[in-house]
C-alpha cells in the first residue's frame, strides 16, 4: 500500500482518536452490529450459535460491515465478544438464549493454573482472520472507515470468569479480589498477558485502533479501582504501544465517575469513552484537551427518537465542540432500537448539531 499512510492519516476517526478536534465529529455506536438490524438477525440465524458467528470469518466480517453499509459510520468495530478471551484461554463458554453468557466458574488455583495462555493466538485465529477480511473489504468499499479492534479489560473479564455469568453486583469476584488478592492477581496477570497478545494480533491483522471495555469498573471502591482497573490497563497500554506505536487506544472505564481523570493520566489511553452517567462538561475538565473524549448518548434516547433524541444529542455536541471528540453512545445499542432512529442521529451528528 504505497499511498496507504497518507490516505489513512485522513480518516476522520483516526484523526480524532489521535487528539485532533475534527468537526463535525466522527461517529460510530457501541454494539452497532446487532439484533436491532434485520440483516444481522438473518446472518445470526445462518451461523447457528453466537460463538459460531464470532469464529466464522466471512460471516463475522459481514456483520461488522452491515452498519457501515447502512449508515456510513466512521468506525467499524470488529464483531466478536469480550468473553472470547476466556474462551481462547480454554474456559468453557456458551451463550444461552435469553440468558446471556455462561462460563464454567473459575474459583481456585487449579482452575486459574489450567488457563492456556500459549493457546490464545491459535484458538483466536478465526477472529484475526475476520480482522484481515474486514480491513480488506473496508479498503475496497469504505476507505474512510476506521477498523477498531477490542478486548475486555482484565477486571471486567475476570469478573465474568469468576462469577460464571452476568450479575448485578459480581459478589463472588469482588469478594475474591479482597479475600485472596494473590490468587485474583494471578488471574489478572494472565489476562494482562492474554489481552496484550490478543490486541497485538488484531493490530497485526489490520485493526487501526483498539478499545478496552471495562464495563464493571464502576463497582469498585477507589483502592480496588486503582489496583484492578488502572494498573492492569497501564501495563496493557504500555505493552501494546511498545509493540505498535501509533495505534490509538480507547479506554472505557464505565461508571468510573471523577476517577476518569486519574484513569486517563495514569494509563496513557489516547481516548476515553464516557458512560451515560458522565457529564461531558465535567469530563472535559478532568481530561486534558489532547486526549479525545467519546460518547455518551443514552441508548434509550435513541430508542425514543424524535425531540428527546435531538435534544440529548445536541447537548453533547455543544459540550464537546472545539475539542477532540468522537460521537457515540454511553453504552451498547438496545435491541429494540428502530433502525430509522439511528439514521436520524447520523444526520444530526453529520450536521454538527
Ligand atoms: C460486558 C460485555 C459483553 N460483551 C461486550 C461487553 C462490554 C460492553 C458492554 O458492557 O456491553 C462487548 C461486545 N459484545 C459484542 C461486541 C461487538 C461489536 C459491537 O459493538 O458491535 C462488543 C464490543 C457483540 C455481542 N455480544 C453479545 C451479543 C448478543 C448475541 C446475540 O446476537 O444473540 C452481541 C451482538 C452477547 C453478550 N456478550 C456479553 C453479554 C453480557 C452478552 C449478552 C447480552 C445480550 O444478549 O445483548 C458480554
Image: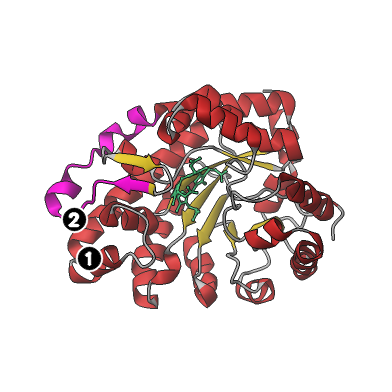
Query: Is any atom of residue 288 visible in this view?
Result: yes
Label ID, residue 97: none
> In this view of the protein, which residue sits in the foreground, 327 or 235?
327
Is residue 336 rendered to the left or right of residue 175? right
> Where 229 falls versus 87 (above or below)?
below
Residue 193 lies, in percent from the top left, at: 33, 46
Mark 2 C-beta to ligand 1 under 8 Å: no
Residue 99: say if magenta: no
Residue 163 lies, in percent from the top left, at: 28, 57
Residue 212 lies, in percent from the top left, at: 48, 52
Query: Is any atom of residue 322 visible in this view?
Result: no
Read off the residue under disc 2: 107
Q: Element at badge 1?
A: helix
Residue at image point 24% right, 69% down: 175
Is residue 186 rendered to the left or right of residue 52? left
> In this view of the protein, which residue sits in the foreground, 255 or 13?
255
Which quarter of the figure has residue 231? bottom left
Q: Could you tell me which quadrant the N terminus lies in?
A: top right
Residue at image point 50% right, 74% down: 259
Distance CA(mark 1)–CA(mark 2): 8 Å
> In this view of the protein, which residue sits in the foreground, 102 or 315?
102
| Mark 2 crowd level (few <14, some 14–19, many ≥20, 10 Å Cα) | some
- Answer yes or no: do the residues labelled 1 and 2 have beta carbons within 8 Å? yes
Read off the residue under disc 1: 176
Residue at image point 45% right, 69% down: 218
Mark 1 C-beta to ligand 1 under 8 Å: no
Which quarter of the figure has residue 208? top right
Residue span colored magenta: 101-124
Is residue 124 rendered to the left or right of residue 278? left
Q: Element at badge 2?
A: loop
Amino acid at each position: 500500500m504505497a499511498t496507504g499512510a497518507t490516505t489513512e492519516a485522513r480518516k476522520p476517526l483516526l484523526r480524532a482518536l489521535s487528539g485532533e478536534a475534527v468537526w463535525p465529529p466522527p461517529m460510530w455506536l457501541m454494539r452497532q452490529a446487532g439484533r436491532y438490524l434485520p440483516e444481522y438477525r438473518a446472518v445470526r440465524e445462518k451461523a447457528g450459535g453466537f460463538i459460531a458467528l464470532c469464529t466464522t470469518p466471512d460471516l463475522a466480517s459481514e456483520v461488522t460491515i452491515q452498519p457501515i453499509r447502512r449508515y456510513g459510520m466512521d468506525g467499524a468495530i470488529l464483531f466478536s465478544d469480550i468473553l472470547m478471551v476466556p474462551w481462547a484461554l480454554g474456559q468453557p463458554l456458551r451463550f444461552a438464549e435469553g440468558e446471556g453468557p455462561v462460563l464454567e466458574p473459575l474459583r481456585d488455583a487449579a482452575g486459574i493454573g489450567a488457563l492456556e495462555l500459549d493457546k490464545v493466538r491459535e484458538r483466536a485465529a478465526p477472529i484475526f482472520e475476520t480482522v484481515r477480511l474486514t480491513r480488506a473489504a473496508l479498503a475496497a468499499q469504505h476507505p474512510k472507515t476506521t477498523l477498531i479492534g477490542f478486548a475486555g479489560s482484565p477486571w471486567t473479564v475476570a469478573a465474568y470468569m469468576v462469577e460464571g455469568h452476568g450479575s448485578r453486583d459480581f459478589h463472588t469476584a469482588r469478594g475474591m479480589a479482597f479475600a485472596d488478592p494473590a490468587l485474583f492477581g494471578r488471574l489478572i496477570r494472565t489476562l494482562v498477558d492474554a489481552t496484550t497478545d490478543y490486541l497485538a494480533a488484531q493490530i497485526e491483522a489490520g485493526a487501526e485502533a483498539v478499545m478496552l471495555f471495562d464495563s464493571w469498573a464502576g463497582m469498585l471502591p477507589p483502592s480496588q479501582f486503582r489496583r484492578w482497573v488502572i494498573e492492569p490497563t497501564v501495563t496493557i497500554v504500555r505493552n501494546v504501544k511498545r509493540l505498535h506505536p501509533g495505534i490509538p487506544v480507547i479506554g472505557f472505564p464505565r461508571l468510573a465517575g471523577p476517577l476518569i481523570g486519574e484513569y486517563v493520566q495514569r494509563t496513557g489511553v489516547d481516548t476515553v469513552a464516557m458512560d451515560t452517567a458522565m457529564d461531558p462538561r465535567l469530563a472535559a475538565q478532568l481530561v486534558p484537551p489532547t486526549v479525545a473524549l467519546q460518547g455518551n448518548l443514552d441508548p434509550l434516547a435513541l430508542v425514543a427518537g424524535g425531540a428527546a433524541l435531538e435534544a440529548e444529542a445536541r447537548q453533547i455536541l455543544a459540550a464537546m465542540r472545539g475539542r477532540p471528540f468522537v460521537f457515540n453512545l454511553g453504552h451498547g445499542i438496545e435491541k429494540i432500537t428502530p433502525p430509522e432512529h439511528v439514521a436520524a442521529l447520523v444526520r444530526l451528528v453529520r450536521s454538527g448539531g
